[in-house]
Amino acid sequence: MSESLQYFSEAFAAIHESMEALHQIGAITKQTMDEFDQTCLTPFESLSPQDIRALRERENASIAVFARYLNVSHNQVSDWESGVKKPGGAALRLLTLVKKKGLQAIA
């Protein structure tokens, strides 16, 4: 089981590990495994500019420090907070993780 995956719960992580083993021995197809992954992994959600700012402030981080944790530029975070741009992809996944588990989860 990959340590970088984020699951709904420890139970989902254990079930996923079992399903992965079944996939490796050919008992389930790749398509079935992909569909199962979708149900086990923590979904990401879109965040409003206000949500992003509130999240950063909750973590007591300046824009520069928050950006460094997310591996993006200061301007990128500023653009998200002002609504000029929206986070997507990996950045949105990281923001969702920070929202659920705090900034230390990605430290």
Image (cartoon, helix red, strand yellow):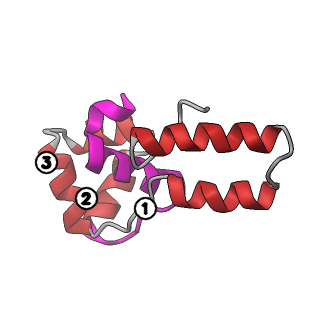
Q: Quickly name the residue at label 3.
A: 57
Position of the N terminus by quadrant:
top right
- Quarter of the picture containing the C terminus is top left
Local crowd at mark 1 within 10 Å, few (<14), some, or many (≥20)? many
Pointer 3 local density, CA inside 10 Å: few below 14, some 14–19, many at least 20: few
Q: Residue at x 39, y 54 (%)?
A: 76
Magenta stretch holds residue 101: yes
Which numbered disc, 2 or 3, marks the residue that appears first in the sequence?
2
**Please, which residue is most extreme toward the right here?**
26
The residue pinned by badge 2 equals 52
Identify the element where label 1 is drawn: loop
Residue depicted at x 52% and y 37%: 14
Q: Is residue 26 magenta?
A: no
Indicate which disc, 3 or 1, sits on the residue closer to the N terminus. Answer: 3
Tell me the CA gap for discs 2 and 1: 10 Å
Between 96 and 2, the residue placed more toward the observer is 2
Q: For the residue marked with disc 1, what is the amino acid?
A: Pro
Give the extent of the magenta segment. 82-107
Identify the residue at horizontal 53%, vertical 34% (top origin).
4
| Residue designated by label 1 | 87
Q: Nearer the viewer, residue 37 or 96?
A: 37
| Residue 5 visible in the picture | no
